[in-house]
Image (tube, rainbow, N blue to C red):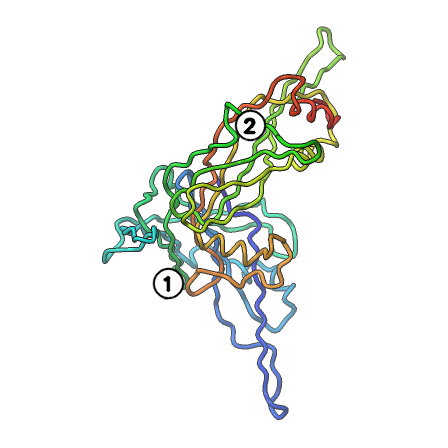
């Protein structure tokens, strides 16, 4: 299951300027603005929707965000549904909604989670809306998310998206060349090349590195050995698509790859070995999510002055989009103790 985690909630301030003869007021009448986050992936077993609201008041904003009713809708206040509409594929490769009515409706159930990080916002209980969608989403369809206010029956927020579809191929690395780094010493890289799939506007490869801890208890005879499997996900650079190129390539630097492993394991000391395969995930997303990410983190950084200058939510803010996070390929790694790959692992001095 994938839950949308750590969703940021905006605190909207409204300033009304008037002439010197008119009293200045920093606040306006309270208006309801839903904040909606939902990412759909046909490979997920459950789709989650996060719905909260912006607020405006006369007191300290930090006091408001700590109160559940200020930012959360109470159970029964709203209904969340997702409509499935027939889609038509245009010459530009984009799907558009067709028909006079949805062919199916997914109803989302109210749930409460308690694993939100602490901070200024209320975090004791967090509401989410969930619907089982395993094997049910159709790549030939358009999906429209709706948030309905039960007291009036009005749709207070909505948005739509198509899915990402098609078969992807990973050409490099492969089980002939193996997952390894080539080039001159100090400037070695691993080339990652994959084919485009329909609807994907941005890609990010992620390398899943597997290893096992061996912990030996010498207090008993014979010695008791505990073997614990682990993995680390190591993200690569993102690559934007112009929706025309058939293949994409990025380079993974050897120093970055091994330093990430070392930094993750340096505080725990035990004997380890690496599994002789890695998984190469090629995560991707639609135009709306790519635009939201770019607007939230300009120039690839996490220092945005205005993290909410993009939204595709009609009547609110946030994002409703599609992604693929489960496309992956198994690639063998070198096993020879003389290989650069194994030597580099041992040189980390974290137990390999």
Whichever of callouts 1 and 2 sits on the residue coming sooner in the sequence is 1
Question: CB atoms at circles 1 and 2 under 8 Å apart?
Answer: no
The spot of residue 227 in percent (x, y) is 63, 18
Q: Residue at x 46, y 63 (%)?
A: 316
* Residue 74 is at least partly visible in this image: no
Residue 221 lies, in percent from the top left, at 73, 7
Q: Residues within 10 Å of mark 1 (few under 14, many from 20)?
A: some
Q: Is residue 12 above or below residue 233?
A: below
Q: Quadrant of the C terminus?
A: top right
Other residues around mark 2 within 10 Å, as few (<14) / some (14–19) / many (≥20): many
Q: Badge 2 is on which residue?
A: 278
Q: Which residue is mark 1?
A: 155
Number of the label disc, if any, that sits on residue 291: none
Image coords of residue 26 (percent x, y): 61, 78
Relative vertical location of residue 14 with respect to residue 214 in this rendering, above or below: below
Identify the residue at the far bottom of this view. Answer: 21
User: Where residue 336 appears, x then y in whole percent?
Assistant: 63, 17
């Amino acid at each position: 299951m994938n839950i949308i985690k750590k969703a940021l909630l905006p605190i909207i301030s409204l300033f009304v300027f008037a002439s010197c003869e008119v009293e200045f007021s920093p606040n306006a009448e309270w208006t309801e603005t839903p904040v909606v986050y939902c990412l759909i992936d046909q490979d997920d077993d459950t789709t989650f929707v996060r719905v909260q609201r912006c607020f405006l008041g006369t007191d300290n904003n930090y006091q408001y965000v700590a109160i559940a009713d200020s930012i959360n809708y109470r159970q029964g206040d709203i209904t969340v549904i997702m409509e499935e509409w027939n889609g038509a594929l245009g010459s530009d490769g984009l799907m558009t909604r067709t028909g006079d009515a949805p062919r199916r409706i997914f109803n989302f159930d109210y749930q409460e989670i308690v694993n939100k990080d602490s901070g200024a916002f209320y975090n004791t209980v967090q509401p989410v809306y969930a619907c089982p969608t395993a094997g049910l989403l159709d790549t030939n369809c358009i999906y429209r998310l709706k948030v309905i206010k039960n007291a009036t029956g009005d749709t207070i927020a909505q948005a739509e998206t198509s899915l990402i579809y098609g078969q992807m191929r990973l050409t490099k690395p492969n089980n002939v060349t193996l997952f390894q780094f080539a080039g001159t010493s100090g400037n070695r890289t691993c080339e990652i090349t994959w084919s485009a799939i329909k609807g994907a506007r941005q890609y990010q490869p992620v390398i899943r590195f597997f290893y096992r801890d061996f912990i030996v208890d010498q207090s008993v005879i014979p010695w008791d050995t505990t073997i614990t499997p682990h993995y680390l996900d190591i993200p690569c650079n993102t690559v934007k698509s112009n929706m025309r190129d058939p293949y994409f390539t990025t380079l993974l630097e050897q120093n970055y790859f091994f330093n990430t492993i070392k930094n993750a394991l340096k505080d725990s000391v035990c004997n380890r070995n690496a599994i002789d395969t890695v998984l190469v995930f090629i995560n991707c997303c639609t135009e709306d999510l790519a635009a939201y990410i770019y607007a939230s983190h300009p120039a690839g950084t996490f220092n945005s002055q205005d993290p909410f200058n993009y939204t595709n939510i009609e009547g609110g803010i946030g994002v409703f989009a599609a992604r693929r996070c489960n496309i992956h390929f198994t690639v063998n790694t070198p096993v020879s103790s003389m290989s650069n790959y194994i030597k580099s692992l041992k040189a980390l001095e974290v137990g390999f």
